[in-house]
Image: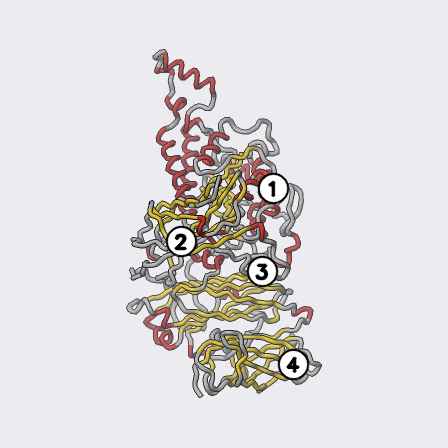
Amino acid sequence: MNTKDPEGRWRVPVLGRALLAAALGLAPWCLCAAGVAGSETFHETLDVVTVEVPVYVVRDGAPVRDLTADSFELYDDGKKVVVTGFDVVDLEDETPPASGRVPGPGLQAPLAARRHFLLLFDLSFSEPGATIKARDAAIEMVMNDMRPRDLVAVAGYTLSGGARLVLGFSPDRRQVVAAIRRLGDPQLFERTGDPLKLVLDLALGAGVQGSLTSTGSNQGGVGGRVDTDAIQLQNLRELQRESGKAQRNVEMGRITAFLNSLGELAQILGTVEGKKHVILLSEGWNSALLVGSYNAQAQMQQAEAAARGAVWEVSSEERMGQSAELNFLDRILEMFRRADAIIQAVDIGGLRKDAISGGKAGSDNSLFMLADGTGGELYRNFNDLGDAMGQLLDRTSVTYLLSFQPTKLAGDGSYHKLKVKLKNVRKARAVSRPGYFEPKRFAQMTAIERQLDAADFIVSGENSGGLAAEALATPLPGRDGKAYVPIVIEVDGKSLLAEQPDQKMAGLELYAYAFDAAGGAQDFFSQNMGLDLAKVRPVLEQSGLKFFGHVDLVPGRYLLRVLVRDARTGRYAARALPLEVPDFGAAQAFLSPPLFPEPLGKWLMVRENKNRRDASLPYPFMADGQPYVPAAAPRLGPSGQDLHLMAFGLGEGPLALEGWVLGGDGQRLDGARLALVKQQSAASGGLLKLVARVDAPGLAPGDYTLVINVRNQSGSELTSTGRIRSSGGP
């Protein structure tokens, strides 16, 4: 469920990722045997955590702005606590990112302050025609009414499979729309290639951004329709026929199964930071089975029979409902309240194409019970969900994020009640999470909770969790209009071994996702590996593990996010790398970052799974006919070092190089020298390879930025930068 990183930040993962795939085999050039990480217990401190409390303040249905930290009082289990952090996210100030802009701080608001919407389509209690209409209405709302910072997930409920996630909470509207459109596809709930379920279909790449338009039932849209409405309608009818014709006991079993799935969903939502809005699109079920008859005349007849003593004519279930199931419903609703999740129920009974009446008898009562019991609302027969939920979207557009540090936590996942009070804010009310669960130790987390945690790190972009790792990426000419982008990930061996001195096996999880300017994931890779420490401990102690993978990207600007996690202890490192991919097909000039070669024997080398490799592309990093893997965190010694550069679009003539070093304050430092050693002829693809020598004598130990400028005979020049670490010395 919840965990913490060594810097004391509260870690709460993002909803609903698939279970991790089985450990992938290592590449032939790996020096170790693959295995499974152990499950031994370990020590993990839980001394300092930070709990984030998102708060909406509403007056007359509208958000209240311009409040400060002094406007709030926060209570943990009835005891007033000190607010240690305060932030404000106002969606009215938010505009979609300009074309080509890498997602910046504006889109990377604190995860707890971002709105989470889960679109849950009920495919068993709803008529297929109504589901088709609800699907189109949901697409309209996602495209026209939600803000770029909003995270949207898509799930579907079937009697045979329960509530199953199609897409996890994502800012990528292309993936969201594709997930909604494919509801009813028989293969929809099958495992995809993405273990974190942030990506449904990589065919929805940056090249189709222009097709992000709102859509009606007969329009095109993102990537075109996967299936026609007729095929979808038939698939939905086949799913519904699995339920059979329900008698009272069968119907009660169906309702119980539905509520049980909601309970499981609530448990998962409890691990998601921030306010969650579950938009349940359903026709509901016969509420009389839980709360008695919905028919006033029938209720009167039952009451009269009871009054005259004709008890044999009184049905307790008809009059009072099923008390056990009603108690079960109350427990489910309490789970949603504790998870800070609100059910916004949408009665789609009047939306289906073949509707004759206004829906099923008593169904709106059941939906009302779910919504009202969690603090939500019931919306009846709305074709425009954005209009129906406009008030909700407006009053939650301003989020005040309060933070505090609880003390004396047991680390057992227990629940604590929270209360927020307003100070000197008249005629307004504060809506906040009702409580929080204590963090669990990583060893106590379930497999799905661990995957939720990993997805959270990818989406939130936090970068420190007790494990030391670095990453390097550079675009190179590829094929089919895409660049080939190698990614080098280095894991410090001593850091990895720090908490497992006596372990025989260690496990690592690696993830890399490339997000475009709109927050869409354009490509990714993931890999699990087991390390036989009896064989590889010496090389890990000497340096560490170096991994080589790649993604394929069309021209544009991206934010590359890399996550490395210890599969046994949960320690992690996350890195965010801005990346600009040139248009190699249009001969756009490009200069790679400085690449510092390292001998292969220095690191434990692991290459990406063979299914991800493109055998038609030659290995890009070569020096004098020998392959090398560049350093992700190069160290510059006192005697200098060779570096490699790859240039594109500068022609064949001689080039001039200039280099300098920037300190941590961005100021240029004197004394750095850069000399061109070798210039190879351009390859068939027009890629020049340069070898230079960099020397910075007297540079004090520390981290710096190396800036390199390359100029051709005509005066055209390119500049690139890279991080270096100086070991000091004369």
Identify the residue under disc 2: 83
Which residue is at the far top?
A: 308
The CA distance from mark 4 to mark 2 is 54 Å
Where residue 674 sits, quadrant-wise, is bottom right
Alpha-carbon distance for marks 2 and 3? 35 Å
Q: Position of residue 359 (x, y in %)?
A: 55, 29
- Image-based side of 666 in relation to 468, left or right: right
| Numbered tag placed on residue 711 in the rendering | 4
Mark nearer the N terminus (2 vs 3)? 2
Q: Counting residues from the N terminus, which is met first, the one under dot 1 or under dot 3? A: 1
Q: Find the residue positioned furthest to the front.
A: 424
**Residue pointed to by mark 1:** 136
* Amino acid at pointer 4: Arg
Mark 3, residue position: 516
CA–CA distance in space, label 1 to label 4:
54 Å
Q: Amino acid at mark 1?
A: Asp
Q: Position of residue 381 (x, y in %)?
A: 57, 33
Residue shown at 53% from the left, 39% from the top: 61
